Amino acid sequence: MPISNPSMPSVPDGLHVDDLTLDETGLLITARTTAAQASCRVCGRASARVHSRYWRTFKDLPWQDRSVTWRVQVRRFRCGHCPGRIFAERVPGLGTRKSRRSDRLAEAQTDIGMVLGGEAGARLSRRLAMPVSGDTVLRLIRRRGTVPSPPPRVVGIDDWAWRRGRSYGTIVCDLERRRVIDLLPGRSSAPVRDWLAAHPSVTVVSRDRSGPYAEAARTGAPTATQVADRWHLLVNASEALRGAVERHQLEIRSVAHRAVKDPPASLGLRETAAKPEVTSRRRDRCEAALCLHGEGLPTKEIARRLGASRNAVRRWVRAGRFVPYRRAPGSSRLDRYLPFVEARWQEGQHSATALCQELHAQGFTGGYDIVRRWAARRKRGAPARPPSTRIPSTRRITRWLTGDPAALSPEDRAFTEALCSAAPRLSQAAEVIRAFADLLRQNDPTGLKPWLEAAAATDLGGFVTGLRQDEPAVRAAIVEPWSNGPVEGQVNRLKLIKRSMYGRAGFDLLRQRVLHAA
């Protein structure tokens, strides 16, 4: 029977509807094909000789929140040109050979799976009266092909962590169109080199200062311009200065000692030494790490052998010698009330309970135990503990040295000035790093060579050597407008998609979903 209601599912051409059955479970449409002949899939010639008939079932898009099922009678034909050949006619507008869902239903379920993944996509599909299993959604995602992108001209390359510290991948973005164009397994040189060789249209490659990516661009796209990412250059410069700060621990400690002995209004630093046995054990591990580093072992292997963290090994290697642990006790809520409790103690008030009550009246928010421990030390004749502070970390000192002095607090600026006076070479290195940052902002590559010569005379020799080895890419970073900023944003999107899959996705599935999101 023909369907005249426009709200009912549309009937594809070449089908005649014989019956409609509507119940609580869904809508069943019984139909049959109407073509007089069909074409053989082998020879392509038409035949009208019917051999037999059979039924095919297709799931289709829902109607009025009810699932729709097509039950179509299909004919088999004899081919008059292929001896013994029997073929079945195709069902127009519903599905392909051996499929059990219509093309439009498969398209909708694939789109849902691309956004939500397998199980989440299956739950939403069931809610929308398109029941499907999570495994089927994943198969639909993997079956869909990727849309070819136009030949890229400017690409950005960066790595991303599949499992941090264990396995990585490489993301390739079109910087002109700001979209992901491919994901590659691993972060070695070979996959990137092969990809660049297969895309000769690439003329600019933006990358970090990773050696494998530089080698891949040099061999896979030898005529392309390599651009070092400016953000990574600034990070490398900051790390180089931090290494110089690590090598000036004696000056930092000296400034801290002077601040404790004669603290001005802007400095209030103190230091407590670690226990002798802990210091000795740490010294032994540091010396062992330096020996293994001299033998050429990587940081990860040194940390595994010594049972230390990789950050500790890097800190020892940067310093080049043992540096005592600098951590001092944290501040106490009692510190700001020490003058008051000292005065009350001298007046004869030695009760911790009474002192705690008086402190609460003064606005003290700490507990009784803090006051009790302080009173116990005073009763033993131990000196009162001065207000505790921490010696600034090397990372914080590096930030002070490279930042705008006007933006620092008076305390931080006073410490930085005292340190620069005590360590002239560290002050010189900080000036060189600030000059490098200005060089990247001025878009004037003529100042790079004089800067390299001036920086070579400071404590930044390793950083300068690395820049000279990658000088063309650094020079391009000064003049070219491209950077890896858009790539970092795409990595953020990639991580969101990866985490939504709960770590159970393979590389092919992740690649499909990332390229679809792009």
Image: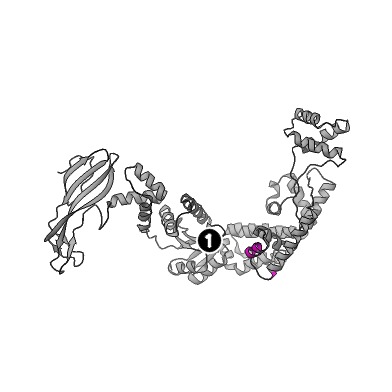
State which region is magenta. Answer: 294-304
For this rendering, which residue is in front, 188 or 470? 188
Q: Secondary structure at mark 1?
A: strand
Residue 337 at what x, y percent from top left? Answer: 79, 35
Q: Which residue is mark 1?
A: 167
Question: Against 495, is 202 above or below?
Answer: below
Q: Residues within 10 Å of mark 1 (few under 14, many from 20)?
A: few
Residue at horizontal 67%, vertical 57%? 434
Would residue 297 be counted in the magenta stretch?
yes
**In screen coordinates, is 167 left or right of 260?**
left
Would residue 19 be counted in the magenta stretch?
no
| Viewport quadrant of the N terminus | top left
Residue 358 at what x, y percent from top left? Answer: 79, 28
Residue at horizontal 17%, vertical 43%? 19
One can see residue 241 in this view: no
**In screen coordinates, is 3 left or right of 493?**
left
What amino acid is at disc 1? Ser
One can see residue 318 in this view: yes
Colouring scheme, one of rainbow, by chain, secondary structure, one colour: one colour
Residue 11 at what x, y percent from top left? Answer: 20, 47
Residue at horizontal 50%, vertical 56%? 487
